Amino acid sequence: MSEFVGWIASRRPCLKNSLVCTHILVYDCIDMQVRYHIDSRPIEYRWYRGKEASISKEEIICLLDQQRPYDLAQAYEKGPHVDLMNLSCDQDWVAFVNRWGPLWMSGIERSQGRSRTRLEWCWAFQRCLKSYARLLECFGRPGLEGHRLRDFLNASEDENRVRGRKPPATATVHFFVALQLDPAAQHNFDEEFKLWLRHASQPDVRRVIADVIKFVSFAATGCLVAEWQGVRPRIAARLTLDSLDEALEWMVWNGYWMKKPQMFCQECQRAFRPESAHPRKYCSYDCAHRATDRAWHKRKRAMEKKGE
């Protein structure tokens, strides 16, 4: 049996020593009733909030609150991904980390109860996530789509550079593939993009955007687990979220799955989550009132000018 487990671990290394936060939908094998169940795993399989976060030498240093673990998937209802998109200064990161914990931490940092994260990487991650959410929101809006695509591709490449990642394919590489260009060749991205956007038809722009959106996805992986609770068998579907940054990306995807995606206020540009599935232009009554009042005065001036 131990040889079999070793073989499985070698074939699927992600299943070995993985720190997984789970949200479980349980099918009872006896009466087949669907039940929602909060996993009773040990706290080391959950994420830690910050107990005391501070900024030092361009890093966020966080003392982990190991007495307040939480489930990453269940945190979706509180909207940490929306909170992250609205961060505007370094001190905002301190409050965010105290509430939700660091974006990522190693196994050693987890066991020691202290993490360090570069601010440059935090901001690069936020720009990438926010620009992707804006790309999703503006899909189908003529005049905005191309600019949102450029913003996202630039932010994605910047995050890869800051984190030192060299994945086999990036969003920019996929963009060149969609244009039937050789991604291995030397390209001036800004020049290539401007040239393409100037001559591309609207259907071509939307086709490329759709390809890039599908390539990025941000959907989380999962697995089925067969286990016993005493004498009762159980098949559990578990959502695999290994870190807060993975969970925040998944939350963007999940907003569309739940048909309540995050939006951006057309007045103050802040991200928000609508209370219903109906689209909204503004995040609050105040923003809606300011926009309506400004539009009214604009129409009034136009009528006065026309009457002169």
Image: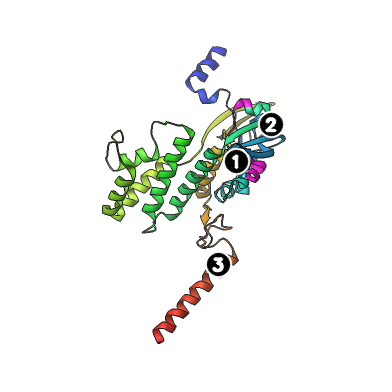
Mark 1: amino acid: Ala
Image colouring: rainbow
Looking at the image, which residue is at 48% across and 36% down?
A: 162
Left or right, 261 with reference to 234: left
Q: Are marks 1 and 2 in contact (CB under 8 Å)?
A: no
Of callouts 1 and 3, the N-terminal one: 1
Percent from the top left, x then y, of residue 24?
61, 37
Q: Quadrant of residue 35?
A: top right
Looking at the image, residue 15 lies above or below residue 278: above
Left or right, 48 with reference to 255: right
Left or right, 303 with reference to 72: left
Q: Is residue 191 visible?
A: yes
Magenta stretch: dominant SS?
helix
As rendered, which of 169 and 122 lies closer to the eye? Answer: 122
Taking the magenta stretch, the answer to whether it contains residue 102 is yes
Looking at the image, which residue is at 54% across and 62% down?
A: 282
Magenta stretch in the rendered image? 94-108
Of callouts 1 and 2, the N-terminal one: 2
As rendered, which of 26 and 292 lies closer to the eye? Answer: 292
**Numbered mark located on residue 288 in the image:** 3
| Number of residue marks | 3
Q: Which residue bears the numbered disc 2?
A: 43
Q: Quadrant of residue 182?
A: top left
Q: Closer to us: mark 1 or mark 3?
A: 3
Q: Which residue bears the numbered disc 1?
A: 73
For label 1, count other residues whose C-alpha is less than 10 Å away and answer few (under 14), some (14-19) or many (20+).
many
**Numbered mark located on residue 142 in the image:** none
